[in-house]
Image (spheres, rainbow, N blue to C red):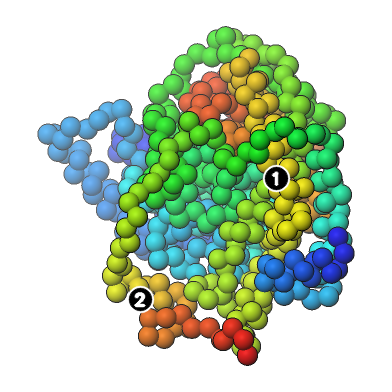
Amino acid sequence: MDLSEINHLANLSRLKLSPTEAENYAQKLTAIFEYIQKINQINTDNILPMAHAIPLELKFNHLREDLGFEISQEQKDLFLNLSNQSEQGFFTTPPSIE
Amino acid sequence: MNNLTCFTLAQSAKLLAEGKISSQELVQISLNKIQQLDSGHQGLNSFITLCDPADLLAQAKLTDQERFKNKNNLNKNLDKNILDLSGIPIAQKDLFCTQNIKTSCGSKILNNFISPYDATIIKKSKQAGLIMMGKTNMDEFAMGSSGENSFYGPSKNPWNLAYSPGGSSSGSASAIAAGLVSIATGSDTGGSIRQPASFSGITGIKPTYGRVSRYGMVAFASSLDQAGPMARTAEDCALLLNILAGHDVLDSTSSTQPLENYTANLNKPIKNLKIGLPKQFFGAGIDPEIKNKIQDSLKIFESLGAEFIEVDLPHNDLAISAYYLIAPAEASSNLSRFDGVRFGYRCENPKDLKDLYERSRAEGFGEEVKRRILIGTYVLSQGYFDAYYLKAQKIRRLISEDFQKVFAQVDLIMGPTCPSTAFKIGEKIHDPLALYQSDANTVAVNLAGLPGMSIPIGLSEELKLPIGLQIIGPHFSESLLLNAAHQFQLNTNFHLQIAPGFGELFHE
């Protein structure tokens, strides 16, 4: 795992890394992925990937009506107060491009 | 009874029902112990947030008044089979949203987050009348096996304060081991209930995936996370699981599998129970002393009529690799909600939106969390998805099928929970890969969605550190796990041992 790869990943995941941090992560990730190469010891060509934690027959497909609902002003205020940067019912941020 | 007396949940309920103790007294005892033993340089640091003592005592007083009213109301049809647990202290892992109370997930990024709502398991605990003493310390966003990844500093193992209590449910484990509370909630994604239970000498169970609602539980890896009870005994875990378990419409991954009374079968004899011992759980990486102590504990099950056979989990050596591909991938997605905009930490003077995201996240997240986000982003990225994430999902299926085949032959699987006893704080923090290895026997259980428990079975000779036995069952077999564990605990007393200096268990 080289530095350019780490910097690319940091950009994708919106994490600002200092050069020292990037170097550290590069080293640690290299070691981790060396270990992870074990997964190539085995042929899995005919195996179906498993995305659900338990067999589907043990779960229930929870679907509901596709209906929206209003929340009270009190609730809206509660959520807005979680940030100290809000105006007229909206969260505020700097512009996306300077 | 002295000021360091510890109670189990079952004992507390009985004493309350018999009028021998009040809820106010139970809460005061817990408060005193927390104040005495949890803070300061020599403190356990098991709590991140302690609830307001006046408020707690007021809650306790209300419960006492209710209990008194019910006692005198001769017409009330009290169901004698349902134990009244109201007025008993509980500690909640800081991963679960608690309304009006800080919910930090052990992270700087949520250090200022006061949750506007309760997680479902918090609601259920309140409905049962349990009194939340506070929120316990944990590895940040449940990523870690030692408690050292907490923004609030590590919790300490009451058995030896220089040692880790395990993680990520580190505070819950140390609080119970030291008798500050009798019960707590934990969460388990790769072993975070079972490993701390093993390191701290207590009992914990990770239920089947979907058994307990994840609504309000801050997500780490959505296909692996489960909340569960931690306590001194299997009986206590069963009582708490009765409260926590059940289908929740607010969690679309929660199961409609019928609920059981998890205490109903505790006393069933385990004669003829077939137990599988996977050779992979007793491999070269396991400390020889642990292997011996585990073998000794298995003799107890044998004396109760259980039979053992050796079984094979051929893909278990790939479990850590698969887990450390799947879990970070899911985490990288789940943690993208922490962007500094609507709640949580926001950096100073961001120059644009991208800067806001990048610096809020970089400054708010700890090193291990960032590491896992980077790994997850990598394995999901273009060009690598098939080679890593998809491959890991295929290995996941193989691991799951290994368990299915074994459960066709046996009722339960057992083995050491961890390859070693607790390690010293600071010993492994610079070697993440070494730390990941301590999950060798636990992660496969999460990958397969199975229920798994850890119970204390003894102490190491030299350092007197706890050793845990893991019990694994088929989907939704929590009753059987708790039954087997309870039978073991009826015939041994390791679960009754409190760490030296932290008091003694109450006895009549």
Does residue B114 show up?
yes
Query: Gap in Å between the C-alphas at discs 1 and 2?
Result: 42 Å
Q: Which numbered dot is residue A77?
A: 2
Name the residue tied to disc 1. B390
Q: Which numbered dot is residue B88?
A: none
Q: Are marks 1 and 2 in contact (CB under 8 Å)?
A: no
Q: In terms of depth relative to the viewer, which is nearer, B370 or B149?
A: B370
Q: In terms of depth relative to the viewer, which is nearer, B295 or B497?
A: B295
Q: Dot 1 surroundings within 10 Å: few (below 14), some, or many (20 or more)?
A: many
Q: Quadrant of residue B74?
A: top left
Q: Chain of mark 2?
A: A
Helix, strand or loop at disc 1? helix
Helix, strand or loop at disc 2? helix
Q: Residue at x 43, y 37 (%)?
A: A60
Q: Please indicate whether residue B20 sits to the left or right of residue B186 in the image.
A: left
Q: Quadrant of the C terminus of chain B?
A: top left
Does residue B427 show up?
no
Q: Position of residue B283 (x, y in %)?
A: 81, 28
Q: Quadrant of residue B469?
A: top right
Q: Please indicate whether residue B263 sits to the left or right of residue B357 in the image.
A: left
Q: Please indicate whether residue B182 sits to the left or right of residue B128 in the image.
A: right
Q: Dot 2 surroundings within 10 Å: few (below 14), some, or many (20 or more)?
A: few
Looking at the image, is mark 1 or mark 2 nearer the viewer? 1
Q: Position of residue B151 (x, y in %)?
A: 64, 65
Q: In terms of depth relative to the viewer, which is nearer, B185 or B51?
A: B185
What residue type is disc 1 on? Leu
Q: Position of residue B362 (x, y in %)?
A: 68, 72
What residue type is disc 2 on? Asp
* Residue sitting at the far bottom: A98
